[in-house]
Amino acid sequence: MGIKRQKIIKDPKLRGEWAESVFMERATEHGLAVSKPWGEMNSYDFVVGKSGRFVSVQVKSTTAELEDGYICTVRGAHKAYRTGSFDFLAAYVVPADAWYIIPAELIRGKESLTLYPNSKKAKYEKYREAWHLLKEAAGSCADRASQEAGNPDEENDRAGAAAGNEAGPRPGGIGESRGTEPRFPTNALERMQAAFKFARRRMEGNDPRPQKEEN
């Protein structure tokens, strides 16, 4: 199967914008959530990941051949990017339709790098189509943190049961649960639901509180 050839856009600005659109498409195909920051003053082009864990990505593209490879410029404002400017470089070799997902620390201080899509032994070849690095840095870490935190509903149930056992039974109270030990609301949603049930019982004439004697 031959290499899929892309139509080359001559204007560098337009080609850069097109490469960014291709990155969004490919990242989405790999199950990554991609966001574009507002404005053009940021040192990165995209934010990838989920709530609680985001990584920044700088997108570059190249059509410039150099011997058997392609030279890709990675500088900004005519000088190398500062440390911390972004987390990953996504370099697109347009003629070879090849993406390189490279951690920023590997290109620190560089203004360009040469990529060799036709050589499996080249320096950056192990980063070719390495979308899994973005998944691990963004999505997987967030998922793992969520798993470590546990299921909120299960945690609330356990906490509620513990609170009910410590406080002792309160028949007819807000946290009453038929057939089980009573427990008390442990979050905003449960408090709202309990208040609604309490109000409904009062409206139906089933107020669990002792009634005051009229004089």
Image: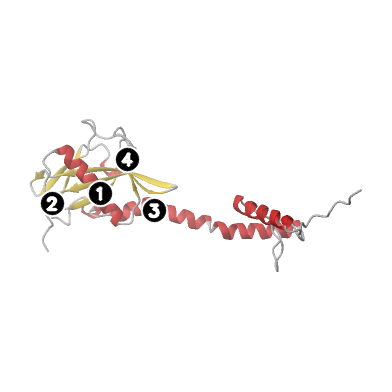
Mark 2 residue type: Gln
Report, in whole angstroms, how far the alpha carbon at label 2 lies from the one at label 3: 30 Å
The residue where tag 2 is placed is 6
Report, in whole angstroms, how far the alpha carbon at label 2 lies from the one at label 1: 14 Å
Q: Nearer the viewer, mark 4 or mark 3?
A: 3
Mark 4 residue type: Phe
> Which of the marked residues, 2 or 1, is nearer the chain's N terminus?
2
Report, in whole angstroms, how far the alpha carbon at label 4 lies from the one at label 3: 17 Å
Report, in whole angstroms, how far the alpha carbon at label 1 lies from the one at label 3: 17 Å
Task: Say which quadrant the N terminus sits in.
Answer: bottom left
Question: Residue 114: x, y in percent?
Answer: 16, 45
Mark 1 residue type: Phe
Report, in whole angstroms, how far the alpha carbon at label 1 lies from the one at label 4: 16 Å
Q: Judging from the image, what secondary structure is the residue with disc 3 in?
A: helix
Q: Nearer the viewer, residue 16 or 77?
A: 16
Q: Nearer the viewer, mark 2 or mark 3?
A: 2
Q: Nearer the viewer, mark 2 or mark 4?
A: 2
> Which of the marked residues, 2 or 3, is nearer the chain's N terminus?
2
On screen, residue 29 versus residue 95, left or right, reads right
The residue where tag 3 is placed is 139
Task: From this view, report whether residue 87 is shown above or below residue 159.
Answer: above
On screen, residue 85 versus residue 19, left or right, reads right
The residue where tag 1 is placed is 23
Q: Nearer the viewer, mark 1 or mark 3?
A: 1
Mark 3 residue type: Gly
The residue where tag 4 is placed is 86
> Which of the marked residues, 4 or 3, is nearer the chain's N terminus?
4
